[in-house]
Image (cartoon, rainbow, N blue to C red):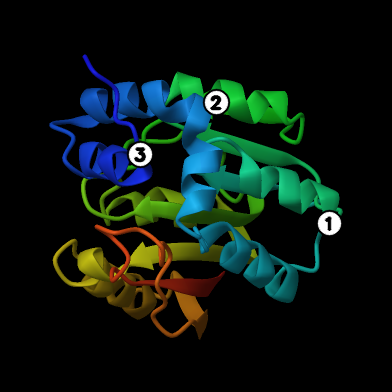
Amino acid sequence: MTEPTNTDAWLERVFGAADKHDLAQTYDRWAETYDADMLAIGYMNPAVTCGLVCRHLADRQGGILDAGCGTGLIGEILSLLGYGRLVGLDISDGMLERARRREAYAELRNRMLGEPLDFADEAFAAVISSGVFTAGHAPADALDELVRITRRGGRLILAVASSAWEAGGFKEKIATLERAGRWRPVEVTRPYRPMPLSQSKGAATTRCCVFERL
């Protein structure tokens, strides 16, 4: 199979993946150039996510799950800022290998969001997920497990693509968890363009949400 030659071609392939296996294999093949490719389109989600972690999470050693960690850029940034006990999940072994080279995570696991996660209840002071809640990736029902493994009083910091907000069921799922007393909203950014220099996805928007686990 001929590999894409630019970031937009890779994006078209991952957003058009036929199933989770196709998605994982595509990220495996993209892993080596992913960081440089995303930098070239001005990718903003890691910076926004890390900024919100620093604003809302005072406990630097309580454990953070990076759900959909990719190449581990966020973990490396948080480690440099003094956060420890970082655990990363991703569906791509290729991405996890790149994350492992950064030596920022205490543990890395191949797991799929939307399926049961093998962590104890309230295992983490915070759960973050950046760039995963979007078309063809993790479903809104994945939020149930992420809430379960976040300790009471902890934070969930989640970047949700505007395209998935309504069509992917995230708006309703977020409201359902709030009505059930599982979490409360703390901050929601205004919509921003996470890939502003992309020719195909430059107009797409995302919002980053912060919730307190109740």
Q: Amino acid at mark 3?
A: Asn
Residue 50 picture location, percent across and down: 66, 62
Tell me if mark 2 has few (under 14), some (14-19) or many (20+) residues whose alpha carbon lies within 10 angstroms of its own: many
Which residue matches tag 2? 96
Residue 109 picture location, percent across and down: 54, 26
Whole-angstrom CA distance, mark 2 to mark 3, is 22 Å
Q: Residue at x 19, y 65 (%)?
A: 169
In this rendering, position of residue 138 left or right of residue 189: left
Which residue matches tag 3? 6
Camera-side mark, 1 or 3: 3
Position of the C terminus by quadrant: bottom right
Residue 6 picture location, percent across and down: 35, 39
Q: Which mark is residue 81?
A: 1
Q: Quadrant of residue 195?
A: bottom left
Tell me if mark 1 has few (under 14), some (14-19) or many (20+) residues whose alpha carbon lies within 10 angstroms of its own: few
Q: Residue at x 36, y 65 (%)?
A: 160
Q: Residue at x 80, y 47 (%)?
A: 79
Q: Residue at x 44, y 64 (%)?
A: 159
Q: Which of 88/207 is in front?
A: 207
In this rendering, position of residue 132 left or right of residue 40: left
Tell me if mark 3 has few (under 14), some (14-19) or many (20+) residues whose alpha carbon lies within 10 angstroms of its own: few
Q: Secondary structure at mark 2?
A: helix
Q: Amino acid at mark 1?
A: Leu
Q: Which of 96/31 is in front?
A: 31
